[in-house]
Image (cartoon, rainbow, N blue to C red):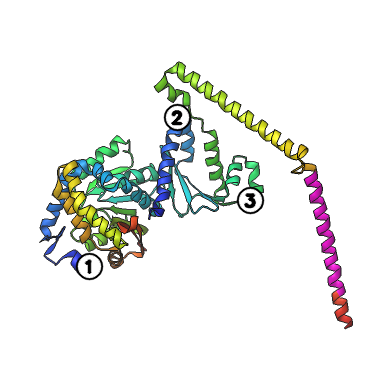
Amino acid sequence: MLKLLLPGLLCTVAEKVLNPVIGMDPDAHSRLNRLQGKQFAVRLRGIPLRLVFTAQQNGIWLNSHDEPVDCSISADLSALQQLSDPSQLTRLIREDKLQIDGDLQTLQQFSQFFQQLNPDWQERLSIYLGDAMAHKATNGIQLLQRSIRQYLQQSDHNLRELAQDELLLTPVAAEVQQFSQDVSAVAARTELLQRQLAGLLSQSRAFA
Amino acid sequence: MSEQQHSGTQDSTHFGFKTVARDEKVSMVANVFHSVAAKYDVMNDLMSLGIHRLWKRFTIDCSGVRPGQKVLDLAGGTGDLTALFSRRVGPTGQVILADINESMLNVGKDKLRDLGLVNNISYVQANAEALPFADNSFDIITIAFGLRNVTDKDAALRSMFRVLKPGGRLLVLEFSKPTEAWLSKVYDLYSFKLLPAMGQLVANDRESYQYLAESIRMHPDQDTLKQMMQQAGFAETSYHNLTGGIVALHRGYKF
């Protein structure tokens, strides 16, 4: 009964979060001016929802519809995360993980805008906590972020080593490469055999 | 219910469940809205538990609005749709908030100015039956919870068709007929018992909210309204039932 209304709810919540964050970045509005009037749509594969971002001077406004826009992409979540690296675009399109319709420059401009978004949390916190406390709190959060990131990187490294070297559960990169070379060689030999068989078959038909 | 039943006879029309002279209805509806204007937004949130905001969001989605377009928010009242449109059409676009009722228009004007939305919005006091705009003026026209209060709905639809640009679209968001029998019973109980009591309690105005419940029942159902839009000239007309048909969004194009 509420299915049609859920995208609207999602867009409302997203706008309420996104625009105050944009408002906390003192440089965001000059960058928004360059995007003004452009529309960009994202469809996540497997989810029946197309989000349309409209950039204006006063923020980014969201909708959900299937109307034409300046640039539209369809991708899965993992491909979307790799969009921040422009060098990955060609590979993602070739592997059919990403489909782009429209102006590629608009996609790059929106992507750049979100990457460069740098909200001044300290300034906003200082309104409630005072300058000194806000400074300490922000430093504390940044320290915590760095520690968590380091811990996750270290855990990931340790886990990979354990799986590859100790438990021998997953192959190392060289083994994967060797395996894929072997597979290619088998595929080539099979193809050759197939051609020879086809030749023999046509010869036997000619004799018969 | 037939179109004739909805529009009354040539000399008379409906005001809720009452039959009144056509000339009288305009002033009677005006009195209702003069009375409720100040508490209109609070009552909307209370009556719909805030869901009216999602109905309006869905209307914006179905409008496919683009930066630079010209939009007419007819019977726009306190400007909820105007605010949503204004942010999307941006400085190169324009939104006209039109309402026949001065009190509602003033509340809308104040609210939108408080939101900082001033640059691309104009205000016009206008009767939907005879819109004071040139032919082919707008890319999008919306009328949300307003059509049922119009005396001559066919004339209003024809007038909207006239001022819409070729390729433009009309969106009519209006109370309609619940699609499930059980919901219809619950809705009747709610709108005839609880709604007037809430009106009395919050806005000190039982009669206006009694009229609201009655006017909803007298409004054309989904298919009748779709047919009326087609008769006015709209093409590719369709509707979406929202919240079980309590509200329906009709859409039609001018080609």
Tag 1: amino acid = Glu
Quarter of the image where the N terminus of chain A is located: bottom left
The label on residue A24 is 2
The residue shown at (45%, 29%) is A24
Q: Is residue A77 above or below residue A124?
A: below
Q: Which mark is residue B65?
A: none
Observer-nearest of B153 and A160: A160
Query: Between disc 2 and disc 3, whose residue precedes?
Result: 2
The answer as to whether the residues below labels 2 and 1 share one chain is no
Q: Which residue is mark 3?
A: A93
Q: Residue A114: give x, y in percent of width and height.
A: 52, 37
Q: Is residue B120 left or right of residue A29?
A: left
Instruction: Report whether B127 appears left or right of B23.
Output: right
Distance between the alpha carbons at the discs numbered 2 and 1: 54 Å
**Is residue A13 within the magenta segment?**
no
* Range drawn in magenta: A175-200
Parent chain of label 3: A
Q: Tell me residue B53's x, y (percent).
A: 33, 46
Q: Amino acid at mark 2?
A: Met
Pick the quarter of the image with the C terminus of chain A.
bottom right
Q: Residue at x 25, y 37 (%)?
A: B110
Q: Chain of mark 2?
A: A
Between circles 1 and 3, the one closer to the viewer is 1
Q: Is residue A190 magenta?
A: yes
Above or below, B23 relative to A23: below
Identify the element where label 3 is drawn. Answer: helix
Note whether residue A35 is visible: yes
What residue is disc 1 on? B3
